Every structure is written in C-alpha cells, then in structure tokens.
Image: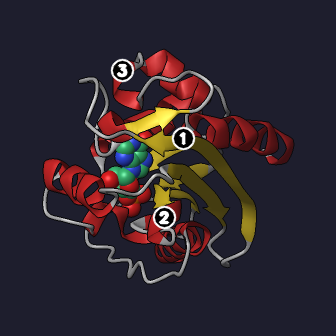
Amino acid sequence: MMRKLVIATSNQGKFNEFSQLISDFPIEIVPQPEGIKVIENGKNFKENARLKACTVANQTGCWALADDSGLSVAALQGAPGVHSARYAKTDLERINKIIHALEGISDRRACFTASLCLASPENKILIEVEGHCEGLITHVPRGTNGFGYDPIFQVNELGMTFAEMSMETKKVCGHRGKAFSIFQSRFREII
Ligand code: IMP
C-alpha cells in the first residue's frame, strides 16, 4: 500500500504548490483534516515548521510535511520574522509599516527564510531544511506579481523585486524554491 503524506497547512495555495512539487514521488498526498489547531509559538521558522509537522503527523498517524516562512529585516533586529503574517492587518499595511520603520535608515538589508519539516507520527523529524534569499528593502513598492512583501523585497543577484519577477524566476532564486530543491533530493533518499 502506498504511504500517505499529509500536507500540514490549511492554505489551499500552499497545498497545491507542495502537491505539485512532490507529485513525482510514489506517495499519496492528502490535505490536512479540518479542526487541527497548531499553536505557532516557536522562536524561529524552524521551530514553527516542526510544531506544525509534528502536531499534524501525531494527530493523523501519517507522515506530515509543513513549512514556515517570513521576512527578517536587519535594521529591525530581524522583525517581522516569525510574526510576518501578523505584523499588521493587510499586505498593504504590512508593507507600509516596514517602509515607515526604515525611514531615514540606510541599512536596507533583509532576508526571506523558508523552513520545511517532515515528521513521522512518532514525532521523529525525518527531514528539516531551510532556504534563504538575501535582498534589500526598497523605498517604494515595485511590481505587481506575487503576494505579501514581494513588492518591497529586491533580490541581490537580480536587482528586481519578487513582484517584478515571473513565478519561474522567483522559484529558482526564492527562499521557498531553494528549500524545496534541497528537500526533494533528501526525500528521494528516504522514500
Ligand atoms: P506562514 O504562512 O506562517 O509561513 O507565513 C508566512 C508570511 O510571511 C506570509 O503571510 C507573508 O506575509 C510572508 N511571506 C513568506 N513568504 C513570502 C514570499 O515569498 N513573498 C512575500 N511574503 C512572504
């Protein structure tokens, strides 16, 4: 019988993205059942990804794959970091809050991180990987693609914001794409 893998997210977009990335593997991909609540109180992305993967694996009796991601701004001592999704009410308000916080500050360095964790029902951590993307916070938003903080994050190698890139380019140089590519090769080894 094929092994089941639960994607530990209630976000349909993330579920689709994950499912597509691991569709080549001999595994049955299933969504997270409704009603599972995870308290994301880890102090970093890795801890939160672990909390999500372990809670869902334990409650479903299947392997579970989770991710946690966010933006860390150097001059803001790493904020918004693990609070990226809750930094303000809307994407626009979150973007404005960062631009405002960096007014008059020349150090614009920032980094996106994506942590992925695969856990077993016995809460064994099977795979744990992290992808990073280094860049600068722009003075004004640029571009219309993507989501979240994409319009104000300019990637160092390309000089473009995530929102100015195609999805394919973002996949190659972005934090999530990098984490996925390490994950896929490790997953191939254990499956
Ligand atoms: P998570 O769903 O708990 O991992 O929250 C991640 C939050 O970080 C999102 O709601 C966004 O605000 C931000 N974020 C993560 N990855 C990206 C990205 O690729 N572009 C823009 N914002 C991102």
The residue under the point 15% across, 55% down is 93
Q: Which of marks 2 and 1 is nearer the N terminus?
A: 2
**Residue positioned 75% across, 62% down in the render:** 126
Depicted 88 relative to depicted 136: above or below? below
Q: Earlier in the sequence, mark 2 or mark 3?
A: 2
Residue 183, how many percent across, how many down? Answer: 71, 44
Residue 143: percent from the left, percent from the top?
Answer: 28, 23
Say whether residue 58 is left or right of residue 151.
right
Q: Residue 119 falls in which quadrant of the image? A: bottom right
The residue that label 1 is drawn on is 135
**Above or below — where is 149 with respect to 66?**
above
* Label 3 CB less than 8 angstroms from ligand 1: no
Quadrant the N terminus occupies: top right
Q: Which amino acid does label 3 sit on?
A: Glu
* Count of numbered circles on the image: 3
**How far, Cα to Cα, is label 2 from label 1?**
13 Å
Amino acid on which the number 1 mark rests in the picture: Gly
Task: Determine the secondary structure under disc 2.
Answer: helix
Circle 1 sits in a helix, a strand or a loop, which is it? strand
Visual colour scheme: secondary structure
Q: Distance between the residues labelled 1 and 3?
A: 14 Å
For the C terminus, give its image quadrant: top right
Q: Which mark is residue 171?
A: none
Amino acid at pointer 2: Ala
> Which mark sits nearer the N-terminus, 1 or 3?
1
Q: Label 3: which residue? A: 164
Which one is in front in this view, the residue at disc 2 or the one at disc 3? 2
Q: For disc 2, does the CB lie below 8 Å from ligand 1?
A: no
Q: Name which quarter of the figure residue 144 lies in.
A: top left
Element marked by disc 3: helix
- The residue that appears at 59% across and 71% down in the rendered structure is 50
Q: Which mark is residue 75?
A: 2
